[in-house]
Image (spheres, rainbow, N blue to C red):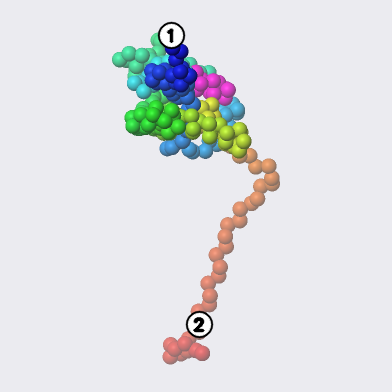
Amino acid sequence: MAEPSRRSMSRPPPRALLAAAAVVVVALLPGCVTVYEPLLGLQRPVVVNLNAPNFEGQRILVRCLPSDHLPAQDMEYLCRRVRNILQKQGAEVEITVPRGARSRAVEREEGVAPPDLMIELSGRLLHEDNVPILWALSYATLTLVPTITEFTFAQDVSIRDGEGSLLVSDSLQGRIIQYFGAGVWATNTVLDLAVRKESEKINDEASRQEFSRDLLGQISQLAFHARTRARVLRGFPPEAKADAKIESTGPAVPIVPAVPAPAAPAAPKAADGKLRD
């Protein structure tokens, strides 16, 4: 029986090559680089100190409305994050994730006082871009050619007082871009390790932290504006008016009425009625 040649033994069958390529592609696909870009609303600077007692003594209800883009578990996670950031500022926070057809209705038990503020959060997908031909090229080149997915979203925020009057309404928009591929992932990893500073790194964790910081900061700032507007609309309490009086600590300064200036004398006239020089 003739022995097979070394060439035939060293060459794997075509199916083995395809299987190995598929394994490599699947192994390299998790090499993802996520880039977050703040757009309308999210790029505004946050001037409210998130560690100060901005909502001391305030009762706040946070409602997170699920949608096709954001399911109930994601909105529940968002509600918990908002609760934590508001509790750090002294608020007593209650969260709810309504489900079903009556998700828009606010149900309160009889005899329970309404909250001072009601924050309602909902999400929308504005645009999604995913080119199928890039995925085919990425598979054909073992992910050396990266695939790119991009979607633009909006986080709608509305804040009402305990009576249901609208105080603040805003739409916070951003964009998420994801690059899948071994080449772009390896290049970005080298730049993160060797060139970029800690605050300039581009990766999934940094993008999540940046987005969370922008979103929670803007929600806190909108809630602070809503609280201020509610106080202005219902007027200041009597004790606040008493504190606002300004007391004089110096001697009283008499007010002297102004004395009118004397009128100028009339020019003398001659006997013929003409003015003298």
**Residue labelled with disc 1:** 1
What's the amino acid at mark 2? Ala
Residue 22 is a magenta residue: no
Q: Secondary structure at mark 2?
A: loop
Q: Check disc 1: other Cα within 10 Å, few if <14, some if 14-19, many if 20+.
A: few
The percent coordinates of residue 210 (x first, y second) are 52, 31
Disc number placed over residue 229 in the picture, else none: none
Q: Check disc 2: other Cα within 10 Å, few if <14, some if 14-19, many if 20+.
A: few
| Magenta stretch: dominant secondary structure | helix
Asked if residue 87 shows in the view, the reply is: yes
**Residue labelled with disc 2:** 267
Left or right side of 130 for 242? right
Which residue, as the protein is rendered here, is positioned at the far front?
1
Residue 247, located in which quarter of the rendered image? top right
Identify the residue at image location x=47%, y=24%: 28
Q: Which residues are magenta?
A: 79-90
The percent coordinates of residue 166 (x first, y second) are 39, 29
Identify the residue at image location x=61%, y=53%: 255
The Cα–Cα distance between marks 1 and 2, rounded to whole angstroms, is 150 Å
Residue 140, located in which quarter of the rendered image? top left
What's the amino acid at mark 1? Met
The percent coordinates of residue 162 (x first, y second) are 43, 22
Asked if residue 168 shows in the view, the reply is: no
Residue 84 is a magenta residue: yes
Q: Secondary structure at mark 1?
A: loop
Tell me the quarter of the image containing the N terminus: top left
Identify the residue at image location x=69%, y=46%: 251
Q: Earlier in the sequence, mark 1 or mark 2?
A: 1
